[in-house]
Image (cartoon, rainbow, N blue to C red):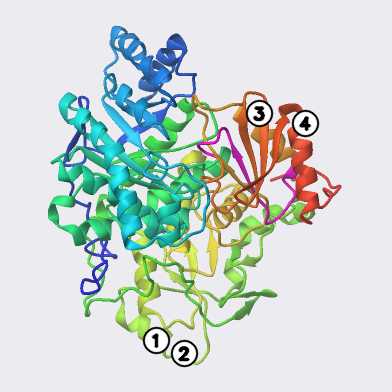
């Protein structure tokens, strides 16, 4: 990277402005440019089963999906894309189809004949990952690039000839050995991996390209996309390619929705993103309402665009957008709980909600209220008000501070401004919304997505020491949501963390039922990270930083991993969950589940 140019991924970190990109056509659907944010998903049927694939594409289209992806793991699978396309078009559906390619360049060449877009992963398109540790000289590195060029140029040419677009989609954990050894398993490695392929395409004057930088960890995902945009800015104005957003292997249920809202919502609020996919370990049609709600939340906040932040001089951000560091305030104690500094992030609730739960606190398990808002001594201010900021900064002792309710401010920008103007010694209480209503609208999905994108985004910036949910009226649900957001953002781990890929045609077992079995057996292991992957594509690389992995190796057979190393092979599926427990036990991370009454949240 050029040392002379500062990294910048958006014009103003305190004010919204959508990134300007060129338009790339995916069939009849424009992505980027002046188009709305497009919603995608991926079918789960076996690509060889034409009828099942056509049915799933039509169901996705009916639900509001604008672009549908289908796996094509070999040339034989890719050949059937012709019949799937014909079936979809015969039904009157014009939704563009995308072939998902891993490892097999010949499958990509075949797929490009039949579908409107091809997705390739630079980490495995022309590389077989061996997890080798070696030093590459510049000459050896260039030899590897020349080898990749030979494999990749034919795909670029056929896409040019047939008018196909392409997604260069890097995934955290599936980087090639060459990239790993030069850049490590880092956001920078993800970005450079994609740029290598795009440079080859640009040499051939091919520009129908969309980027993606996916990870299961929202912090990594956010950092990688920001770094990508900064690098594209450095390369020049004609590197303004559209961006596809997604948190890969987000999982299922609330956890999957929260992780997706944190990663996707945070970037949309910074003006990044032209098309999104919410990856849930559920039936694909369930992804569409979540994606639509995330986009709707983004589009329904026009007031933030023109809001002046302060009459004073421009404010420098207090955080590094490209490298996570927690804003370390001084430690204070409230209600018997320490917060700030490097202490645990605390969960705050109102006196009304506390009293509603007081009779059953012993039944709430880990979802405990810790601090009562009205007794916390928190000071609420308008971060644009110079006098209020100066008065706080002149205090002799650190004080818990938050943004005042009912200000006409967007949440993330207001807390970024507060953190940047406030002296570091003062801890900050984050809020999900600034306009709480006495009358809840009953839409928990909207409350969840709003809280996740606002609080989660700030936590991933390193801002905040305690959180309160104001947008969900139900006391138990607001507590559960608080803890789940802290968990998803990696801020406070209080339960087992699961990385579960969404189903697709490559999956070698039923991901939904298997993930549920594993949850039931291991859900009490606090701080243990378990990856559940349907196949080798989403296997050792995609598991990223999981402690243990459960990966489909062959039909009915499971491979078990410790970190990224396979240690047990070809275990019959009916025995695999028990063998996973044995493996966790062998590594000293198993504890017997406690005997207790069910949580009544």
- The residue sitting at 62% across, 53% down in the picture is 479
Q: CA distance from mark 2 to mark 4?
A: 62 Å
Magenta-colored segment: predominant secondary structure: loop
Q: Nearer the viewer, mark 1 or mark 4?
A: 4
Q: CA distance from mark 1 to mark 4?
A: 64 Å
Residue 202 falls left or right of residue 464: left
Check disc 4 and report the residue beneath it.
575
In terms of sequence position, does the residue under pointer 2 or pointer 3 come before the other?
Answer: 2
Residues 172 and 56: in front is 172
Check disc 2 and report the residue beneath it.
395
Check disc 3 and report the residue beneath it.
513
For the N terminus, the quadrant is bottom left
Which percent across, then down, holds residue 80?
A: 38, 14
Q: Nearer the viewer, mark 2 or mark 3?
A: 3
Residues 100 and 252: in front is 100
Q: Which residues are magenta?
A: 522-538
Residue 485 falls left or right of residue 415: right
In this view, 136 is above or below 508: below
- Badge 3 density bin: few <14, some 14–19, many ≥20, Cα 10 Å: few
Residues 51 and 493: in front is 51
Check disc 1 and report the residue beneath it.
391
């Amino acid at each position: 990277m050029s040392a002379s140019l500062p990294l910048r991924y958006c014009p103003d970190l305190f004010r919204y402005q959508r990134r300007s990109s060129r338009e790339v056509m995916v069939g009849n659907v424009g992505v980027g440019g002046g188009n709305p944010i497009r919603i995608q998903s991926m079918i789960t049927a076996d690509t060889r089963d034409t009828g099942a694939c056509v049915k799933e594409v039509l169901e996705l289209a009916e639900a509001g999906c604008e672009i549908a992806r289908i796996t094509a793991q070999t040339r034989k699978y890719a050949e059937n894309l012709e019949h799937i396309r014909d079936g979809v078009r015969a039904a009157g559906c014009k939704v563009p189809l995308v072939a998902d390619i891993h490892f097999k360049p010949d499958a990509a060449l075949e797929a490009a004949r039949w579908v409107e877009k091809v997705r390739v992963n630079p980490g495995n398109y022309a590389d077989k990952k061996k997890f080798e540790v070696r030093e590459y000289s510049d000459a050896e590195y260039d030899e590897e690039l020349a080898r990749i060029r030979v494999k990749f140029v034919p795909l670029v040419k056929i896409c040019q000839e047939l008018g196909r677009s392409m997604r260069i989609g890097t995934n955290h954990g599936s980087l090639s050995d060459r990239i790993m050894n030069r850049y490590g398993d880092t956001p920078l490695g993800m970005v450079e991996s994609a740029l290598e392929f795009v440079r080859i395409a640009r040499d051939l004057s091919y520009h129908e390209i969309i980027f993606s930088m996916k990870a299961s960890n929202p912090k990594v995902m956010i950092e990688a996309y920001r770094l990508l945009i900064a690098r594209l800015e450095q390369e020049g104005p004609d590197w303004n390619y559209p961006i596809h957003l997604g948190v890969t292997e987000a999982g299922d249920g609330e956890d999957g929705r929260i992780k997706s809202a944190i990663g996707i919502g945070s970037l949309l609020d910074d003006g990044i993103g032209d098309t999104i996919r919410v990856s849930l370990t559920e039936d694909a049609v369930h992804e569409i309402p979540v994606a639509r709600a995330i986009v709707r939340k983004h589009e329904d906040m026009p007031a933030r665009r023109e809001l002046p932040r302060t009459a004073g001089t421009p404010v420098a951000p207090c955080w590094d957008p490209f490298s996570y560091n927690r804003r370390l305030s001084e430690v204070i104690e409230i209600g018997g709980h320490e917060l700030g500094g490097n202490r645990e992030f605390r969960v705050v609730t109102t006196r009304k909600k506390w009293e509603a739960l007081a009779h059953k606190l012993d039944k709430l398990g880990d979802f405990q209220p810790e601090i009562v808002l009205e007794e916390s001594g928190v000071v609420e201010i308008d971060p644009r008000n110079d006098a209020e900021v100066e008065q706080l900064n002149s205090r002799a002792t650190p004080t818990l501070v938050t943004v005042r309710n009912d200000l006409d401010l967007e949440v993330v920008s207001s807390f970024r401004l507060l953190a940047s103007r406030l002296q570091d010694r003062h801890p900050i209480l984050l809020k999900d919304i600034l306009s709480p209503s006495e009358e809840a609208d009953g839409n928990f999905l909207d409350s969840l997505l709003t809280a996740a994108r606002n609080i989660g985004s700030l936590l991933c910036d390193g801002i905040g020491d305690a959180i309160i949910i104001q947008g969900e009226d139900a006391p138990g649900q607001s507590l559960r949501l608080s803890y789940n957001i802290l968990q998803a953002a990696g801020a406070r781990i209080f339960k087992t963390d699961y990385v579960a890929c969404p189903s697709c045609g490559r999956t070698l077992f039923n991901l939904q039922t298997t993930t549920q079995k594993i949850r039931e057996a291991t859900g009490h292991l606090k701080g243990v990270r378990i990856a559940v992957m349907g196949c080798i594509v989403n296997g050792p690389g995609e598991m990223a930083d999981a402690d243990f992995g459960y990966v489909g190796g062959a039909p009915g057979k499971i491979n078990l991993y410790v970190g990224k190393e396979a240690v047990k092979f070809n275990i019959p599926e009916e025995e695999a969950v028990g063998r996973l427990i044995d493996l966790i036990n062998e590594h000293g991370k198993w504890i017997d589940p406690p005997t207790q009454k069910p949580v009544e949240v």
